[in-house]
Amino acid sequence: MNSNFLGLINRDFFHSLLTSPTLKKNDYSEFFLQYKNTTIYVFNNSSIKYKASNVDNGINFSTCKNDYSTFSCTGDLSYKSILNIVTPENHFLEKSDKSPVFTSDSFIKPFINIDAIVEHILFSEKESRKNFPEILELNSNLVSDDTDIMIVNTDDGFISDDRSKFQYTVTVIAKIEGKIVTGFSGFGRREISGLTENQIFLKINSSITNAIRQAHNSVYGKRLIQRSLPVVFDSGLPATLFHEAIGHGLEVDNIIQKKSIYSDKIGQRIANEKVTLVDDASIQNIGGSQTYDDEGTLTKENILIQDGELKNYLLDKSSARALGGISNGSGRRMSFRHNALPRMSNTYIKPGIDERSDIINSIEDGVIIKSFGNGRVDTLSGKFTLKILEGYRIRKGKISEPIKDNIITGIGSEVINNVSMISNNLQFDNGLGCCNKLSQVIPVGLGQPTVKIESINVE
């Protein structure tokens, strides 16, 4: 925790609201408070283009009564403003405790000493431009996002959680063999203090190297002619496939609205028996890591598919009430301006027993994918499209030349039934994963070991 957020709250003030006659009429009432201090460095060709900081504080108030929900929010955290979003009735304002809402104005403490990191970025990018003269332009961003949230509700009392994140991204524009090409890479982490300074520097160096490699692949790669092929999804970032093609269909709002291919299939076999799919926000230092969800529920491992059998959906409190169940810690929101929705956090395939080398050796002619770009999915049909950002041909059991300008398409339910091998080398993505649902963009984690799909359409 970067700030003693919970200790700064006047508990008596919020307790008086939750126990007031006005709010006791509701089945459920909740306050979601956010303190967010973001610092951004923008670099261009080994110099600082500009630095900006932004503070985004606010509160969301929501209620539920007889399955009817309401919410309101404000960026004004004064005593009067908070009361006004609860009720505009003057008698309530007059009778409520008028003590300060907060005991201090010093909410945010420094998240990280960033000066040494900035200095290393400038040095590394300068060296990269010197060593790779084909680079025309090198642009990067460094984001230090220091965020704390607090939730006060009628179920869980007072809960506080640290949501800070550190992120570095780099884009390379190069002229190679007369062609203008680009490459992109980077990394993010929830708790940067868990890394040494040298480890951070190595990740920055690796990000620049990866971006340069992608630029080269854009020139020397070859586009595959459309066909169905055996495809290997390498460990880590390719888990985008399972997030998009499977995970969204297991978010329970889609189930309730009959917008998912997986509606009414709990207990049925929906995947190859080798597949166990998990969503777990309690894993530390990954994109979707949270101690509590955005409704105050303690996060945990949620097994969604076990040995091919559908076991569970992702539930927030609202959807759980509609189904007569309880939340499994999957209520997430973009900010205090939004209500929580059932969302994925860190979604991954559990390791299998195969070796990565055996998986690659088993393919005579196929593709290995190391990362995806943009994608889309229809949760009702399960149809998906994903752009291959980095991929290579496999020829006679050996990784060969890069491919470019290809996508994969298919139906999620068919893909997870076509899984034939899963290795033991589980890895998570680079920490940059994010997901957009109903215009709410939130960070997520993606993970998997190396997975072989017997056949998938490459276009």
Image (cartoon, rainbow, N blue to C red):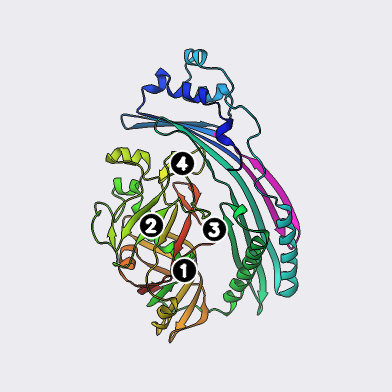
The 10 Å Cα crowd at callout 1, few under 14, some 14 to 19, many 20 or more, is many
| Marks 3,2: beta carbons within 8 A | no
Of residues 49 and 153, which is closer to you in this image? 153
Q: Is residue 164 magenta?
A: no
| Alpha-carbon span between mark 1 and mark 2 | 15 Å
Q: Position of residue 6 (x, y in %)?
A: 55, 34
**Does residue 235 appear to the left or right of 321 in the view shown?**
right
Tell me the magenta residue range.
37-58
Q: Which mark is residue 294?
A: 4
The nearer-to-camera label among 3 and 2 is 2
Q: Which mark is residue 308?
A: none
Q: Which mark is residue 278?
A: 2
**The quadrant where residue 361 appears:** bottom left
| Residue occupied by mark 3 | 431
Of residues 111 and 66, which is closer to you in this image? 111
| Residue occupied by mark 1 | 235
Q: Amino acid at mark 1?
A: Ser
| Marks 2,4: beta carbons within 8 A | no
Q: Position of residue 173 (x, y in %)?
A: 66, 68
